[in-house]
Image (tube, rainbow, N blue to C red):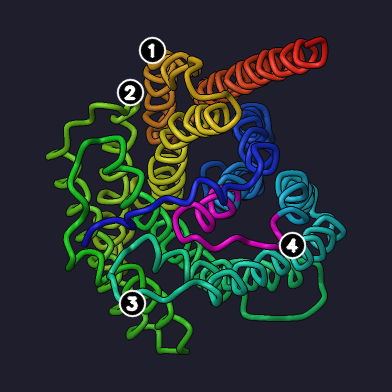
Amino acid sequence: MSAPKILNYQLAPSPALIFGCLLPAPWMGVAAGLLLAFGPGNGMPDRFSPLVLAVTHVLVLGMLVPIILGALFQLFPVVAGQTVPAARWLAPFVAVGSMAIAIGLSVGFLSGAAVGFAVAAILATILYGAITLAFVQAGWRMAWSSRADLTLKTLQGSALPLFFVFAFGVSLAGTFAGWWQLDMQYLLQLHVAWGLIGLLASLLLGVGSTVVPMFWQAKRPSSLWQASLPWSLWFGVGMLLIPLSEDYMRYWLLVLSFWVFLFATSAFVYLLKAKRRFDPAWILWIVCCLSWMSAAFIFFLYLLSMPNLVSPFWRGLGWILGVFCLVGGAVMPINAMLGKIIPFLVFLHLRRRIPLGQRVPSMQVVLPPSRLRWQARFLIASWICLLVLPFAPSIRVFAGLLFSFSQGMLALFLFLALLRYRKELQLVLHVEKKSQEINILK
């Protein structure tokens, strides 16, 4: 089906609200890379080693979550025509609150201090609980449409995966803090499934169905694609809530991994048919699809061969899947979207402030495409190094520094784009002031 005919730019929140969520996030990506490079490497690259757990939560909570929430604050009014009334009060706390939660969990994982988990659980309950309620209200107030538009459906149901991710995360943090005794393996399985598939994969598919056709000169996804998502993914991970036996759980995970593989493969084929005319970092989307395809396929093989896990490859499986899903499947498309959305927001808000007839800096001037292409190359290089880390532990420092450098480049480029916005806005205000003075003299 076609996209919504009208984008409600007049309802867009203030630039400060969105930039406050998006711009600090890449710096936490820098912190995650530095932590990987210089943190205590005991037990690396086991998925349950303290350093891996700390790096994962700094990357996810410090970088990915603020960007996701900031994007939702923007998409609800612009795409769906529904403002998030509480955004003006919640947005200023998204980046700093997520950073504090990530630091608390990192302290808990690296030092074993229960107070770190307790602080993280309390802050997450307050911050993400309030944000979830705000999205529930916004989704409920959206005008239900008969069109099978994937982006609108994803926005309407976005509170569902967010609730499950933070609820299971708080439950795990409370268990680590000693507040209660719960089945940690079961909670962890639900937390990871809802985080990777229920939240990341569904939002990428939902938001990408609008963003990618816009900048890639591609057709909208098919009606069958839009009709089956995102609820098929949410139903798939929702089935894990049922306390099935170990064998039945394994069979269902086989089905779910195959389902994800089909969607990733379809997205990959779809991207290959596009023109990619206005996206200098297009290669990141290709690697994103390949990452999800690889993760789903490898996990499928892992489930089939569970009784015979003896090779070194399987022992590093948790790390490899994490790199595929979080770096290739989340950091890369989010980097690509930031490289387009931030200049677009700068252009949009300048266009609204600058009188008609006056020249507005183009998106290519705000953030030159050559910079984005170089940043994408460094990110892909760090992704490759992270994938081979289980087989070459000596490159841990280099891989962490390379990832930090790639995110530092993006953070710097976005900061320069913001400076350009402020400079152009000051010129506009100066011209308006001079015009008012001239009118008074007349």
The one nearer the camera, 13 or 25, is: 13
The structure residue drawn at horizontal position 38% and vertical position 60%, both measured from the top left corner, is 151
Query: Which of the two discs, 2 and 4, labels the residue nearer the N terminus?
Result: 4
Q: Is residue 39 magenta?
A: no
Q: Does any portion of residue 159 appear in the rendered image?
A: yes
Q: Alpha carbon of mark 2 to alpha carbon of mark 4: how far?
A: 36 Å
Residue receiving disc 2: 280
The residue under label 4 is 124
What's the residue type where badge 2 is placed?
Pro
Q: Earlier in the sequence, mark 3 or mark 1?
A: 3
Report the amino acid beneath label 4. Ala
Q: Work out whether residue 109 can be spotted.
A: no
Above or below 231: residue 299: above
> Label 1 near label 2: C-beta < 8 Å?
yes
On screen, residue 89 versus residue 67, left or right, reads right
Q: For the residues carrying marks 3 and 2, which lies nearer the camera in this image?
A: 2
Residue drawn at 46 percent across, 67 percent down = 193
Image quarter of residue 35: top right
Earlier-in-chain disc, 2 versus 1 = 2
Which label sits on residue 30?
none
Q: Amino acid at mark 1?
A: Ser
* Magenta highlight range: 70-87
Please indicate whether residue 382 sits to the left or right of residue 219 in the image.
Answer: right
Q: Residues within 10 Å of mark 2 (few under 14, many from 20)?
A: many
